[in-house]
Image (tube, rainbow, N blue to C red):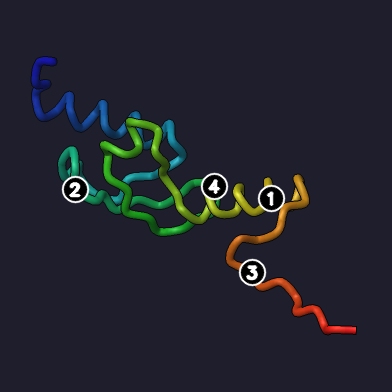
Amino acid sequence: MTKLPDTLQFIYADMVMRAAGLEPEGPYPGYNVPWPCRCTECGAQVTPRFRQVRDGIGACRSCAMRARHAERRARNLPNPGGRSPRRRAA
């Protein structure tokens, strides 16, 4: 893969971040450097790396956790971090 000029790298990175639902709050810092952004879905301040967002690993942890818990509730699965009630011996 050939290296893009800096201006094109920024434009491409900005488009990828916006497509993932993030609003970049600074200039493109680099491929594997945390990039301050704001999630357009929940408004959270996040610092994903461009590499992770581009590869589909994720953008906003808050939204990912909310979706995961909603999925568990929909499937009626127990929360893995939650405690189950103690059973008393009869």
Q: Residues within 10 Å of mark 2 (few under 14, many from 20)?
A: few
**Residue 55, percent across and down?**
34, 31
Look at the numbered disc 4 and give the secondary structure of its residue.
loop
At horizontal 35% and vertical 37% (from top left) the residue drawn is 53
**Residue bearing mark 1:** 72
Q: Residues within 10 Å of mark 4 (few under 14, many from 20)?
A: few
Give 64 or 41, whichever is nearer the viewer: 64
Observer-nearest residue: 2 or 37? Answer: 2
Vertical relation: 60 (above or below) 52: below
Q: What residue is pinned by disc 2?
A: 33
**CA separation in Å, label 1 and label 3:** 12 Å
- Identify the disc placed on residue 41: 4
Which quadrant would residue 24 be assigned to in this image?
A: top left
User: Residues under labels 4 and 1: Cα distance?
Assistant: 20 Å
- Give amino acid for label 4: Glu
Q: Earlier in the sequence, mark 1 or mark 2?
A: 2
- x 26%, y 32%: residue: 13
Q: CA distance from mark 4 to mark 3?
A: 26 Å
